[in-house]
Image (cartoon, helix red, strand yellow):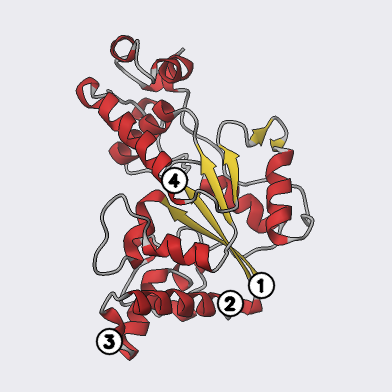
């Protein structure tokens, strides 16, 4: 039996570290984000690529499929369901593997939507995942202000994954006071929307702030994936990746202005925790 586990998270939630650790510890195939444009290249012979992210990228698979069956480009419910199931079949043929970890960010669930969807309705892809009863691990960040700063810094620098290429002096962020509170509301609303869509579904939850322990990953992380895959880890969870962004108090230029602006809001404690 092939197990496709979905790793759900906001961008900048530590999925790179977690995915790397789980892939080696539980011997699973981890193609990183399956809906990532960084791996998409229409000229690439993706099936021959040694890069698993490129070889198993959904966009490559879809392009190839639509060349053979262009009628599937019509986004009916039937066609989108068929396309996703064919994609899973393609994944299952990769190296005869039977365990996968598929990283799908909050921002990517629209790629298999049908003709019509109101923004607050569950994406068709999520409905498909639930109907297939695929295991789903939801990695959340409790401190939404820290998440907001991390996303803004990544967008500003163009560095979305851990890198030592930038010096600390380049990692500086001036928070837009006018927009900050509203965008924090949006982050919270998005997280709650996924919670609502997944209500009643057996979701495994991990918390970004606590899933790392002093000596590696918490026992809860190991137990979660042992339950998902039905096996014990082949080796302790560890990762070659690490956090490289300095503490936010060293990054946010207008720290005092931010703390004053968020005082009395739902995000005051988050900002104080991140900036003190």
Mark closer to the observer (1, 3): 3
**Left or right of 273 on screen, residue 114:** left
* Sequence order check, earlier mark of 4 and 2: 2
Q: Which mark is residue 71?
A: 3
| Marks 3 and 2, how far apart at CA | 24 Å
Cα separation, mark 4 vs mark 1, equals: 30 Å
Which quarter of the figure has residue 193? top left
For the residues labelled 1 and 3, the Cα–Cα distance comes to 30 Å
SS for tag 4? helix
Q: Residues within 10 Å of mark 3 (few under 14, many from 20)?
A: few
- Residue 130, given in percent of the width and then of the height, sits at 51, 62
Residue 163 appears at what percent x and percent y?
46, 42
| Real-space Cα separation, disc 4 to disc 2, in angstroms | 30 Å
Above-or-below relation of 104 to 239: below
**Considering depth in this image, is 105 or 54 the residue closer to the camera?**
105
Are discs 1 and 2 less than 8 Å apart at CB?
yes
Mark with earlier residue (4, 1): 1
Contact check, label 4 and label 2, Cβ < 8 Å: no
Checking the image for residue 196, the label placed there is 4
Q: Position of residue 82 (x, y in %)?
A: 42, 79
Measuring 42% from the left and 52% from the top, which residue is drawn there? Answer: 105
- Mark nearer the viewer, 3 or 4: 4
Of the 4 image quadrants, the one containing the N terminus is: bottom right
Helix, strand or loop for disc 2: helix
Q: Residue at x 40, y 49 (%)?
A: 106
Query: Are circles 3 and 4 on residues that touch, CB within 8 Å?
Result: no
The residues tagged by marks 3 and 4 sit, at their Cα atoms, a distance apart of 33 Å
Rendered location of residue 226, percent (x, y): 73, 54
Q: Which residue is tagged 1?
A: 98
Residue corresponding to mark 2: 92
């Amino acid at each position: 039996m092939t197990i496709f586990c979905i790793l759900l998270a906001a961008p900048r939630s530590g999925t790179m570290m977690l995915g790397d650790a789980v892939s080696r510890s539980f011997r699973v195939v981890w193609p990183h984000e399956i809906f990532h444009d960084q791996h998409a290249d229409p000229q690439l012979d993706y099936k021959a690529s040694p890069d698993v992210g490129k070889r198993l990228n959904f966009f490559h698979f879809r392009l190839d499929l639509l060349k053979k069956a262009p009628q599937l480009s019509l986004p009916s419910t039937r066609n989108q369901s068929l396309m996703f199931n064919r994609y899973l079949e393609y994944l299952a043929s990769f190296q005869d593997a039977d365990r996968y970890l598929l990283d799908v960010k909050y921002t990517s669930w629209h790629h298999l939507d049908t003709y019509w969807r109101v923004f607050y309705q569950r994406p068709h892809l999520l409905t498909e995942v639930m109907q297939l009863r695929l295991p789903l691990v939801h990695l959340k960040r409790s401190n939404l202000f820290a998440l907001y700063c991390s996303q803004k810094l990544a967008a500003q620098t163009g560095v979305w994954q851990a890198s030592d290429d930038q010096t600390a002096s380049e990692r500086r962020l001036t928070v837009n006071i006018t927009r900050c509170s509203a965008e924090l509301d949006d982050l919270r609303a998005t997280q709650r929307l996924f919670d609502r869509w997944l209500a009643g579904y057996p979701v495994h939850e991990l918390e970004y702030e606590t899933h790392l322990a002093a000596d590696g990953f918490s026992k809860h992380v190991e137990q979660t994936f042992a339950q998902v895959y039905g096996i014990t880890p082949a080796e302790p969870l560890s990762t070659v990746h690490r956090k490289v962004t300095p503490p936010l108090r060293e990054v946010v230029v207008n720290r005092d202005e931010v703390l004053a602006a968020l005082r009395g809001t739902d995000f005051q404690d988050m900002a104080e925790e991140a900036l003190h």
